[in-house]
Every structure is written in C-alpha cells, then in structure tokens.
Amino acid sequence: MNPLPEHLSLTPDHHLAIGGVDTVELAKEYGTPLFVYDIATVRTNIRAFKKAFEANQVDYNIAYASKAFSCLAVYEVINQEEIAVDVVSGGELYTAIQADVPAKNIHFHGNNKSKEELELALEYGVGCYIVDNFYEIELLNQVAADYDTIVTVQLRIAPGFSAHTHDFIRTGQRDSKFGFDLENGQALEAIKRVLSMDNLNLHGLHCHIGSQIFESEAFALAAEKLMCFLADIRLETDFVAKSLNLGGGFGIKYTDQDQVTSIQAHIDAVCRRTKELANTYNYPLPEIWVEPGRSIVGAAALTLYTIGSKKNIHGIRNYLAVDGGMTDNIRPALYQAKYQGLLANRAAEENQELYSIAGKCCESGDMLIWDLPLPYVETNDLLAVLSTGAYGYSMASNYNRLPRPAVVFVEEGQARLAIRRETYQDLIDLDYR
Ligand code: LLP
C-alpha cells in the first residue's frame, strides 16, 4: 500500500514491522500463517467513533460486531475501551461472557436465535435483543415470561434499499432473510405486536444496510427512512423510540483502489440527517447506535505467510503458493475480495514481477491475490497480506484438515499470543473411531 498505513514501518534491516514489532521475528517465534493485530490501531478506530459522536453532541452507543473477529483477548480490548458488544450466536455470547464483557453491554442479534440461546442470554442478563422476525417475538416473550422478567428489544427493519456493495453482503434490501419489511406493512405489524407483549420493552429500531460501504449518504438515507417511519408510527401507536440503531458496514481500505470515507464524515452525516428529521417531525432525538466490526479490526491486522512452491507458466502467469489460503481467508474466493501484499523480509526492495498468490487447498479457486507486484521472490520469503483483521480468522475453516493459524496481538512493542495455533491433535479431538 502506498504509503504504508501508520501502524506499519520498516526496520533498519528492511523488514516490515507492525506496531513496532519485526514481522520476521514474529514469524520465527510463532510460525506461519500468522494473524498479527496492532492493538493501538484497534483502540484508535474505536476512539474515532466516540470522538465523532461526541463532536455531534448526541447520545450514542457503539457495539463492536463480534462476527468480524471474536476471541477472549479482543473482548478484553473492547472492555478496556468501554464499548458494547454485538453477538449473533450462543458461541459469541459465551465467549464474550467468558471474557467478562458485562451482560448488560451485550446486544444479541440473529435471524434464528434458538430457545436455548435465548435462555442462555436471559440467564446472563443480556442488555438488548435485536428481534428479527415474528417467530422470535413470540419466542422471546415466552422465554422472558418464563424467567419472570421484561427484556429490552430493538426491531430489525429491512429499510428497502441496498447500499452499493457486493451482492452477497447486502442485507438491507427488501428481498432479504433479515428483518421486518418496511414497505409491505410487516414492520408496523411487528411494532404493534411487540407493544402488546407483557415481557418485551421496545427500545427502538435497527437496520443494517450492508458491508464495506463508502458512501455516507447510504447511512444517512437509512437514518432518514427509519426516522420517517418512526414519525408515522407515532401517529398510529404513540410509540416513541429511544434508540435508532444503524448497524455496521463502514468501509475500510483493502487496496489503493478503495476510496475510504472517514468515520467522522459517516457519523456527521448520520447525526445531521437524524437531527434534521427529529426537528421536522418534532420527534425527541433518539440515541444513535452503531455496530461496527470491520472498521474496528479490519485494517489493524495482517497475515504472514511463508512462500513455498513456485510455478511459472511462461508468458501466462507466475504463481507463488503460501502455507495458508482460503482456510484462513475465504474472502477472495467467496466475494472476489481484493488484498494488498508485500514481501515482509525484503520490504524495501523494488518490485520486479507480477505474482499471483495461491493458497495450499485442493481447490482452483483458492487464490488470495492476483497479479501482485513484488521483488523477485524466493521460496521461504515471508509475505504479508494487509487488512486481514475482519472476517479472516472468524470465517476460518479446517478444510483439507489445515490447522487454523495462531493470532498474535502487538502493543507497545510487545507481542503476545491471543489464540494459539491449532495442532493436528486438535483436529482429531472431536472424532470417534
Ligand atoms: N451489524 C449487523 C446486523 C451485521 O449484519 C453486520 C455484518 C455488522 C453489524 C457488522 O458489519 P461490518 O461493520 O463488519 O461491516 N463476511 C462478510 C461480511 C458479512 C457482514 C455481515 N454482517 C465479509 O467478509 O465481507
């Protein structure tokens, strides 16, 4: 990437360093493939959201979307930064609780929460349930009644438009498995239903319009749609929302082609539009909630791979194979996602060739980067792929029985293991014979 992001630098030996720690040393100590997170960047990203909301003088709530990357150590950082957490499964919920995230700071998402998951959440005392469908309204009310308690909910609305992004990661359009449709009356019906329930306390509305979005206008439009809807339903139901949750989806820089908008600009746009509509409708300004995942952890991490085999098809392509691939980063195969990479052990050398970076899985689609300019590469060189902190480890698999990589956090010049590398023994631990 040109220039290098702030948390990356070169050592006097021309090695790539992250958070001041030499990646060649990290690879030696922890092996490859290796995810390395710069924790100062994670903190800076969280603080950027806080600062942006504070500059707009609104009440707000920031929940880290765990699905981007969930483990005990990352929740520890989230706790230290005192923001909330969004979870989408019993597993993420359990991990957050084990990491001492206060249950009241946990927001529970999902389009098919099971009774067992809801019971677990009730036992822990989860702070907010983002209810997705009619089935869940009944189920959650029943489970809350069984626990003799009243739970706080937001209703997930499908606002009926899609933000400009890749097809598979759109979630705001009408034809979606998520949320209550705004236009066909389901959203209104759902609100009435929740208001009639004894054990549900409707706090506000939620929507999530997609992922990796650069246009602030998309977020502002989502806020506008929900505010107009809230003004309408107040006439019919007297319901006044205390919160407006706009989900996540703030885009990050993967390659130089990505024209990133600052968090400040996104939040300014959302706050401005929400305030305008609150004024227009004389509606009490709700708290504005967001659920960033990628924009907190995505750019903070890189993945280190060791180069193994090389294949040159003269006049056609130069392949380099690395010791990981779609098992630790499914995004290129699944979404044609683009990444930038550089040679971590010879980071100052001039680029000489275009190389295509292949994973080691038995799958032709297991390619990480096409046509990456690099210096002449040798077997055993170290490749760093940048901005792999979101949806890399969290979507990792054991395809071909590859052990999942280790994850290291660096902060203040120190490295520590956040997740150890899986062993072959781990791979057979669940098996019977
Ligand atoms: N809130 C809700 C309700 C969501 O569905 C998501 C992401 C987020 C927040 C966080 O979005 P973020 O800020 O991280 O963009 N696996 C895909 C991304 C799927 C995102 C699903 N929902 C990828 O690798 O690009």
Image: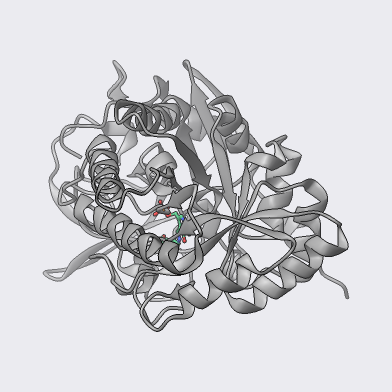
Tell me the residue at 20%/29% (across/down).
348
Location of residue 397 (image quadrant) = bottom right
**Is residue 413 depicted above or below 98 in this figure?**
above
Tell me the residue at 24%/42% (across/down).
272
Q: Position of residue 227 (x, y in %)?
A: 34, 57
Q: Is residue 330 shown to the viewer in this render? A: no
Front position in the image: 42 or 366: 42
Direction from residue 151 to residue 236 in the image, left or right? left
- Say how many tags the image has: 0
Q: Position of residue 166 (x, y in %)?
A: 29, 69
Q: Position of residue 155 (x, y in %)?
A: 53, 63
Quarter of the image where the N terminus is located: top left
Q: Quadrant of ligand 1?
A: bottom left
Quarter of the image where the C terminus is located: bottom right
**Is residue 338 depicted above or below 432 in this figure?**
above
Direction from residue 433 to residue 175 in the image, left or right? left
Front position in the image: 94 or 402: 94
Front position in the image: 300 or 288: 288
Direction from residue 198 to residue 362 in the image, left or right? left
Front position in the image: 13 or 101: 101
Q: Is residue 224 shown to the viewer in this render? A: yes
Location of residue 24 (image quadrant) = top left
Q: How is the image coloured?
A: one colour
Q: Position of residue 90 (x, y in %)?
A: 71, 59
Tell me the residue at 27%/24% (across/down).
14
